[in-house]
Image: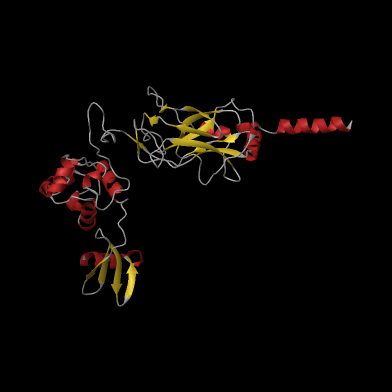
């Protein structure tokens, strides 16, 4: 009788437990995980081979969740089939470090309608002795069309091919995939040699200005900037700090009347004095400026002594400190009127 009661309790418990709860419990008890051995080499462009940060093929390894070392497990004595997939860059959410197999599955990103598979190459590999290399892998589409605008690469044991306890999936850091347009191949082609015209992420102060996004080497914008002696990223950032409207004026409010339009037409001569002018759209301008501002400007400082205070500038002419009455203030600590007064003294 006691045995019957015990069996009934177990059956009742199983009926009240959802499949998601069962899977979550299995995930929590998993002691093995897949992981990418090294970070990805960025940036990533469509059609370009994906490699690790050392420009070597991606490598997937199995590690013990607790020790972080390659385990000596009997379940790894046989080859494991591993599938490489694309994930939404927002997965997992927040600081979540664990997930279920169902959550991983639900965040796999498929190609857009009418497009080729997002990933081509070695999307199915075999893990032997706890390791596998991915020597050929590339994207066929950019990441701008999903909400997060970022992808991750994930790797999982092919469902149904492994009868032992679940092995946690591997994921990379989130990254953007950009179209290959404007990006010259990084290798010399055998039939048609092409030089390297790569953008730099982040750019350096001494980089030529065409290393910035939206500015093509020997293109119209590059020629205009060179004509005004804006040759490097540092030159660009200096003028952006000192006189951004000289680079490209931006209208800060929409047209609200016919009078606005007439006023704008009278400003046409002023627009002619702008280096980049109206030929660069708002979106292009924002992309160029955002890229330029990722540059590391360094710790070098310059001091300009004014009648009421001394201004401390960084390498791109941005005010970082104000010295007055033997007191050093950062720009963030100034009131709005004080900031206006400081701007007038530059």
Q: Between residues 333 and 61, which one lies in front from this camera angle?
A: 61
Residue drawn where x is 84% and y is 32% of the image: 5
| Left or right relative to 194: residue 335 | right
Quarter holding residue 315: bottom left
Q: Between residues 325 and 189, which one lies in front from this camera angle?
A: 189
- Residue 203 percent location from the top left of the image: 29, 48
Quarter holding residue 190: top left
Quarter holding residue 74: top right
Which quadrant of the rendered structure holds the N terminus?
top right
In the orientation shown, which residue stands out farthest toward the right? 1
Q: Is residue 56 visible?
A: yes
- Residue 139 percent location from the top left of the image: 38, 31
Q: Between residues 341 and 160, which one lies in front from this camera angle?
A: 160
Which quadrant of the rendered structure holds the C terminus?
bottom left
Q: How is the image coloured?
A: secondary structure
Above or below residue 123? Residue 171 is below
Above or below residue 259? Residue 160 is above
- Residue 204 percent location from the top left of the image: 28, 51
Residue drawn where x is 29% and y is 69% of the image: 322
Q: Can residue 261 be seen in this view?
A: no
Residue drawn where x is 56% and y is 33% of the image: 129
């Amino acid at each position: 009788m006691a045995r019957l009661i015990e069996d009934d309790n177990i059956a009742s418990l199983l009926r009240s437990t959802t499949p998601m709860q069962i899977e979550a419990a299995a995930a929590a008890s998993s002691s093995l995980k897949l992981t990418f051995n090294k970070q990805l080499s960025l940036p990533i462009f469509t059609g370009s081979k994906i490699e690790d940060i050392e420009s070597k093929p991606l490598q997937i390894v199995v590690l013990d969740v607790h020790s972080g070392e390659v385990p000596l497990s009997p379940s790894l004595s046989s080859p494991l089939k591993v599938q490489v997939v694309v994930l939404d860059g927002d997965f997992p959410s927040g600081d979540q470090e664990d997930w279920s197999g169902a959550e991983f599955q639900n965040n796999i990103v498929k190609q857009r309608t009418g497009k080729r598979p997002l990933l081509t190459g070695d999307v199915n590999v075999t893990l032997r002795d706890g390791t596998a290399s991915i020597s050929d892998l590339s994207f066929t589409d950019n990441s701008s069309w999903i909400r997060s605008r970022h992808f991750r690469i994930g790797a999982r044991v092919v469902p149904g091919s492994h009868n032992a306890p679940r092995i946690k999936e591997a994921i990379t850091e989130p990254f953007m995939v950009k179209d290959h347009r404007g990006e010259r191949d990084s290798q010399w082609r055998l039939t048609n040699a092409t030089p390297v015209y790569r953008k730099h992420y982040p750019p350096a102060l001494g980089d030529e200005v065409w290393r910035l996004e939206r500015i093509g080497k020997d293109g119209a914008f590059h020629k205009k900037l060179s004509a005004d002696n804006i040759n490097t990223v540092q030159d660009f950032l200096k003028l952006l700090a000192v006189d951004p409207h000289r680079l490209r004026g931006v209208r800060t409010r929409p047209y609200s009347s016919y009078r606005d339009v007439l006023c704008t037409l009278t400003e046409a001569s002023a627009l002619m004095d702008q280096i980049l002018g109206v030929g660069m759209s708002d979106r292009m301008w924002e992309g160029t400026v955002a890229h330029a501002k990722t540059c590391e400007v360094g710790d070098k400082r310059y001091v300009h002594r004014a009648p009421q205070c001394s201004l401390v500038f960084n390498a791109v002419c941005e005010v970082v400190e104000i010295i007055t009455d033997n007191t050093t203030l950062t720009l963030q600590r100034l009131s709005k009127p004080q900031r206006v007064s400081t701007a007038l003294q530059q």
